[in-house]
Image (cartoon, rainbow, N blue to C red):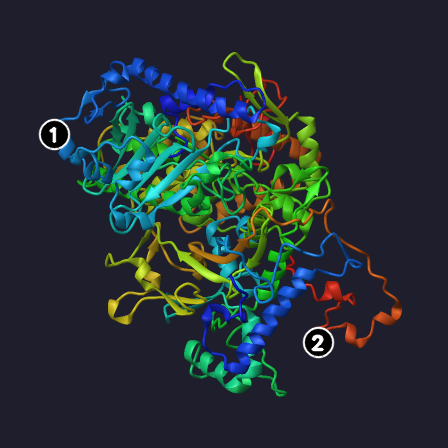
């Protein structure tokens, strides 16, 4: 097989112009290269390089390539296990985008009786929208007006200096629209970094690590409390243990895997899945979906039941959604990469007082770690 | 359908192959299991199918409902015509009798293939194969298919790998006309119909045959909740040796995470429960009210819950363990369905307490051979930490639907469940109240009032702390206040439990209580596999424990 000419946009979306497509390829390719290189070994030990991870545009994919889809539940696990009941966890997950951390976020529309009429789900990474805003800002406005509200104004989305604001009034809540992911860990950069870091095999005290939790505890490539991170890591590492070279399939992205409707019932007996509509992405790479009932049906989402209970929260639907990514493994059995025999360690920072400059703090007052390998690390955090 | 203790499965589970610790030994172990499965068929025959399996005529569906039929008898044409599930419709009525799971799946309509989902379960599935080559891993596939459009209506359970001709093969199939599951198993060259959902409820067959695990006639997945203990899921991948032939099995290559099976099984339990309630309430009179109310008062079966932390990597420095909410109370009904007003959060325990308890109580996984000798032993807890029985979804779903259909008032249910609520399973005080459930036909409208009156009448001459007295006190709480009043009690209890779980004495109490409940589970027929639960050094004759509302655990009187 040949090398890929260029990474395509998530979902093979056609929003980019020619320049935007090139910019996107540059971003993904550079992010993959950085992930292959791994963090600076002077700052993070036993986490670089990642020789079993590769860039589709610079390395051949061999003829023995196989694809492996890895899917997980969209409902945030941390909320699930720390809630005392289903109703409590549904309320908590519907309350803020900040807790929707499984690469899927949603926003709920209710009628004047508080009954749900539509829930919109997105798994589009924010980076795509940043690139689109830089290369074709008018398209961003058009998409917001089409998918969120015709009332969207440019100043709602862009700062006075013209910078796109990912968290804007139309994309920062669970009730006024969800255009793309904004939860701080839900980024494509995090997905790529996680997948790359998980290609490192770990043989600790003579035993090769294989389980979801021991791998993420040792590789420190994400948050063990999530559905997604440990599962992605274990899936990728299982391929690495086959001594394969591994990468994320093009187009790199997070995608809807499925909506199961086991136990759902509609008032008129119609198929509950027929009200699940994909709004963006090609048939194999869905990135936006809505659950809504056409007005002519005479009932709404809130009239549909799951196991006898009416849908009162968007998160009830998230219980039934799975998100996926697709990995590629090739050259099976041929990798000569040696496993790491230690777990990842972050070295303590040498912090002279002069490091505490104004630039060391973000606009929101967060201290930025001066170590490039750490501060730029896209790994997901708890 | 899952994890049931059929006679064949029981034999394959408990007979421990002898191996020499080599891959060759593994191969011989598989062969031995196959032989044992064949022997087990003879056991089944001896127990009532009639004669040697070879006398069961191929091409004939037999009927044998355990507890009712003393031998297998051919299903008549008329009886067969009355079976409308996919198994009967696609195979038996067409005079087709698949021997292997592959034949079964390939014999289904092509359109059904897209709906097929394959799951993998093994109680030994997280024990590294290279560290225990002699361990019988007893892997099973669970397969769901929507043969007719829409929802799953066929569930298959079978051995994963090995000789599929001799492997156990069991099916639960939904009959849309009769609105029941029909239960089938392949025996030798043909198939036996083992009964339908209603047979699970009838006194002669209840708890017998396949109904020892399909206790209430529905689909079963014991480990129904995250982290889906023992199942391959998004939380854990079943471990296979690199050269395990199962890796090349087409079904293995389709295995998906058990998180999806949870959704399916929950919906199937809902489906059967709805059909059951519609049938028994059709004419406004319930013939056997006690059969419904035992789901409220007693523990007809359980699910297993746990933390979703891998026990072997928990160290004293690890973050706290979130203990399963179902250990503390029946949160599904009390909080979700009855809407008690609470601020409760699941109690957590310091990892150091958990680690210390493993050593203090001698936690280990242990499997004994038939002669009682230790076939496998490993120190530590099950793969996921702190596994305990919790209130069964099957019981809760009956209560839930009785509430929705007005068969049960929310206040009555709450007043019952608040009796001894810190013991969500195996509660003797609540079970004591079962005597007030009518056993004769009773009008729907009179059910709750009749029972409440009987209990409160009895309470007048009984101590205040008797089950009747407790119920009566609950019943006195005003209709507009019980959700808040009971919620405050739940909050106070959970707060105390949360505080005690952080202390050495308190956590050790809860370890003993958990083990006490596990021992009660072990006494159930639902307990099929020795490696499902850990064993401890807590003496075998230690008294069973119960939780009190002050969050202390005390011996049962």
Task: Measuring from the top left, give residue B268's x and y in whole percent.
Answer: 33, 43
Q: Which of B299 and B459 is in front in this view?
A: B299
Residue B438 in sight in this render: no
Closer mark to the observer between disc 1 and disc 2? 1
Q: In which quarter of the image is residue B55?
A: top left
Q: Is residue A167 left or right of residue B331?
A: right
The crowd level at tag 1 (other Cα within 10 Å; few <14, some 14-19, many 20+) is few
Q: In this view, does B334 lie above or below A72?
A: above
State the residue position of label 1. B77
Q: Nearer the viewer, residue B407 or B263?
A: B263
Instruction: Please report the residue visible at 65 percent of the width from the left and 34 percent of the height from the top.
Output: B507
Task: Measuring from the top left, give residue A236's x and y in whole percent.
Answer: 57, 51
Chain of the residue on which disc 1 is drawn? B
- What secondary structure is found at the residue carrying circle 2? loop
Q: Measure the alpha-carbon separation of dots 1 and 2.
A: 79 Å
Instruction: Please report the residue visible at 46 percent of the width from the left and 25 percent of the height from the top.
Output: B30
Q: In this view, does A217 lie above or below B160?
A: below
Task: Measuring from the top left, give residue A151's x and y in whole percent.
Answer: 45, 84
The crowd level at tag 2 (other Cα within 10 Å; few <14, some 14-19, many 20+) is few
């Amino acid at each position: 097989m040949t090398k890929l000419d260029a990474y395509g946009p998530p979902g093979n979306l056609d929003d980019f112009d020619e320049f935007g497509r090139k910019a996107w390829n540059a971003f993904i390719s550079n992010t993959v290269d950085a992930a292959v290189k791994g963090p600076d070994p002077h700052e993070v030990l036993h986490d670089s390089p990642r020789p079993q991870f590769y860039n589709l545009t610079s390395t051949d994919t061999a003829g023995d390539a196989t694809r492996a889809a890895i899917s997980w539940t969209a409902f945030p696990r941390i909320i699930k296990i720390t809630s005392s009941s289903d109703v409590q966890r549904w309320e908590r997950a519907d309350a803020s985008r900040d807790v929707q951390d499984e690469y899927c976020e949603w926003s709920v529309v209710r009628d004047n009786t508080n009954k749900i009429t539509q829930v919109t789900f997105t798994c589009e990474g924010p980076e795509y929208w940043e690139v689109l805003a830089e290369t074709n800002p008018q398209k961003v406005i058009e998409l917001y007006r089409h998918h969120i509200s015709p009332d969207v104004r440019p100043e709602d989305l862009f700062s006075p200096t013209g910078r796109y604001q990912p968290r804007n009034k139309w994309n920062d809540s669970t009730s006024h629209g969800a255009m793309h992911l904004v939860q701080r860990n839900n980024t494509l950069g995090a997905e790529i970094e996680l997948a790359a870091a998980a290609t490192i095999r770990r043989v600790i005290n003579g035993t090769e690590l294989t389980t979801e939790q021991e791998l993420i505890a040792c590789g420190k490539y994400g948050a063990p409390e999530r559905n997604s991170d440990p599962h992605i890591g274990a899936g990728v590492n299982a391929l690495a243990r086959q001594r394969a070279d591994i990468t994320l399939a093009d187009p790199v992205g997070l995608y809807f895997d499925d909506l199961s409707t086991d136990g759902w019932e509609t008032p008129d007996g119609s198929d509950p899945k027929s009200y699940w509509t994909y709004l963006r992405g090609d048939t194999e790479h869905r990135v936006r979906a809505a659950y809504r009932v056409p007005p002519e049906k005479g009932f709404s989402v809130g009239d549909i039941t799951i196991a006898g209970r009416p849908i009162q929260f968007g998160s009830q639907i998230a219980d039934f959604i799975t998100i996926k990514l697709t990995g590629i493994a090739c050259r099976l059995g041929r990798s000569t990469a040696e496993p790491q025999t230690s777990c990842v360690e972050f070295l303590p920072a040498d912090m002279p007082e002069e490091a505490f400059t104004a630039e060391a703090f973000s606009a929101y007052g967060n201290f930025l770690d001066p170590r490039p390998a750490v501060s730029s690390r896209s790994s997901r955090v708890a | 359908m899952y994890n049931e203790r059929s006679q064949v499965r029981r034999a394959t589970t408990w007979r421990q192959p002898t191996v020499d610790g080599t891959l060759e030994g593994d191969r011989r172990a598989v062969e031995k299991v196959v032989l044992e499965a064949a022997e087990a068929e003879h056991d089944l025959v001896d127990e009532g199918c009639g004669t040697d399996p070879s006398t069961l005529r191929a091409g004939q569906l037999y009927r044998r409902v355990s507890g009712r039929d003393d031998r297998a008898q051919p299903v008549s044409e008329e009886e067969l015509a009355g079976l409308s599930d996919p198994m009967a419709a696609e195979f038996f009525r067409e005079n087709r009798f698949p021997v292997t799971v592959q034949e079964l799946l390939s014999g289904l309509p092509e359109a059904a293939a897209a709906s097929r989902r394959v799951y993998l379960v093994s109680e030994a599935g997280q024990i590294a194969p290279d560290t225990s080559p002699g361990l019988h891993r007893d892997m099973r596939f669970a397969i769901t298919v929507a043969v007719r459009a829409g929802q799953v209506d066929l569930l298959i359970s079978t051995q994963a790998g090995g000789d599929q001709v001799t492997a156990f093969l069991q099916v639960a199939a939904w009959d849309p006309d009769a609105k029941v599951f029909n239960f089938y198993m392949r025996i030798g060259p043909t198939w036996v119909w083992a009964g339908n959902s209603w047979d699970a409820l009838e006194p002669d067959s209840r708890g017998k045959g396949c109904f020892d695990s399909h206790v209430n006639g529905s689909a079963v997945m014991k480990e129904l909740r995250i982290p889906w203990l023992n199942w391959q899921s998004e939380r854990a991948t079943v471990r296979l040796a690199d050269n395990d032939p199962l890796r090349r099995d087409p079904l293995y290559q389709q295995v998906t995470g058990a998180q999806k099976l949870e959704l399916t099984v929950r919906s199937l339990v809902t489906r059967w429960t709805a059909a059951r309630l519609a049938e028994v309430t059709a004419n406004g009179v319930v013939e056997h009210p006690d059969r419904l109310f035992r789901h409220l008062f007693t523990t007809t079966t359980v699910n297993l819950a746990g933390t979703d932390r891998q026990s072997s990597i928990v160290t004293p420095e690890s973050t706290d363990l979130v203990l399963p909410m179902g250990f503390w109370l029946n949160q599904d009904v009390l909080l979700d369905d009855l809407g008690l007003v609470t601020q409760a959060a699941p109690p957590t325990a310091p990892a150091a307490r958990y680690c210390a308890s493993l050593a203090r109580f001698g936690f280990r996984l242990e499997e004994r051979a038939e002669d009682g000798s230790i076939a496998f032993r490993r120190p530590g807890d099950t793969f996921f930490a702190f596994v305990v029985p919790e209130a069964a979804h099957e019981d809760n779903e009956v209560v839930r639907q009785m509430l929705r259909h007005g068969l049960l008032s929310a206040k009555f249910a709450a007043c019952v469940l608040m009796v001894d609520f810190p013991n969500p399973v195996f509660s003797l005080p609540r079970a004591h109240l079962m005597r007030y459930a009518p056993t004769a036909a009773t009008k729907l409208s009179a059910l709750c009032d009749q029972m409440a009156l009987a209990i409160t009448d009895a309470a007048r001459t009984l101590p205040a702390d008797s089950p009747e007295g407790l119920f009566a006190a609950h019943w006195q709480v005003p209709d507009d206040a019980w959700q808040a009043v009971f919620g405050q009690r739940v909050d106070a209890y959970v707060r105390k439990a949360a505080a005690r779980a952080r202390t050495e004495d308190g956590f050790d109490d809860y370890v003993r209580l958990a083990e006490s409940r596990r021992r009660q589970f072990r006494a159930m027929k639902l307990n099929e596999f020795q490696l499902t639960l850990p064993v401890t050094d807590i003496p075998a004759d230690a008294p069973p424990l119960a939780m009190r509302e002050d969050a202390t655990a005390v011996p049962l009187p």
